[in-house]
Image: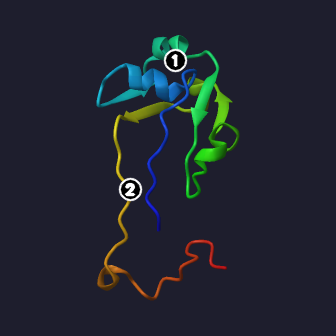
């Protein structure tokens, strides 16, 4: 496991808009608040970071153009998050294969 620092978001991204709000966390409920969905209906870049993060090709490999309100019923923003920590060996169930739930 490797913990990496993430580069600042691109200026034209959804993440940058959320960052500029200066709120530590919030929920955008597009389903219950159609006016919020309408206000955020323009296409913007959204960053996706999963198991692999490649900062050297970040724009190409981790961003896509999306319409946030069309993609999700709601959107949760956290200004800061932390890496997930591996459970101690004694807390892990050794009977479950590493490939669960796929099972290969």
- Disc 2 is placed on an element classified as loop
Q: Is residue 31 visible?
A: no
Tell which tag, 1 or 2, sits nearer the viewer. 2
Where's the C terminus, which quadrant? Answer: bottom right
The scheme the figure's colours follow is rainbow
Please, which residue is most extreme toward the bottom here?
Answer: 95
Q: Is residue 34 left or right of residue 53?
A: left
Q: Is residue 54 left or right of residue 24?
A: right
Residue 99: name its quadrant. bottom right
Q: Position of residue 83 (x, y in %)?
A: 38, 56
Residue holding disc 1: 37
Q: Nearer the viewer, residue 64 or 3?
A: 3
Relative to 80, does residue 75 appear above or below in the rendering? above
- Disc 1 is placed on an element classified as helix
The residues bearing labels 1 and 2 have C-alpha atoms spaced at a distance of 30 Å
| First reached walking from the N terminus: tag 1 or tag 2 | 1
Q: Position of residue 59 (x, y in %)?
A: 65, 36
How many numbered circles are shown?
2
- At 49% from the left edge and 39% from the top edge, which residue is drawn? 7
Residue holding disc 2: 83
Q: Nearer the viewer, residue 64 or 104?
A: 64
Q: Position of residue 32 (x, y in %)?
A: 43, 22
């Amino acid at each position: 496991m490797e913990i990496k620092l993430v580069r600042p978001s691109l200026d034209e991204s959804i993440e940058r808009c959320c960052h500029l709000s200066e709120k530590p966390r919030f929920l955008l409920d597009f389903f219950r608040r159609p006016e919020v969905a309408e206000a955020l209906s323009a296409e913007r870049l959204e960053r996706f970071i999963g198991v692999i993060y490649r900062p050297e090709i970040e724009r190409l490999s981790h961003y896509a153009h999306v319409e946030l309100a069309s993609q999700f019923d709601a959107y949760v923003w956290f200004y800061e998050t932390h890496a997930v920590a591996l459970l101690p060996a004694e807390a892990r169930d050794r009977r479950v294969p590493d490939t669960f739930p796929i099972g290969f």
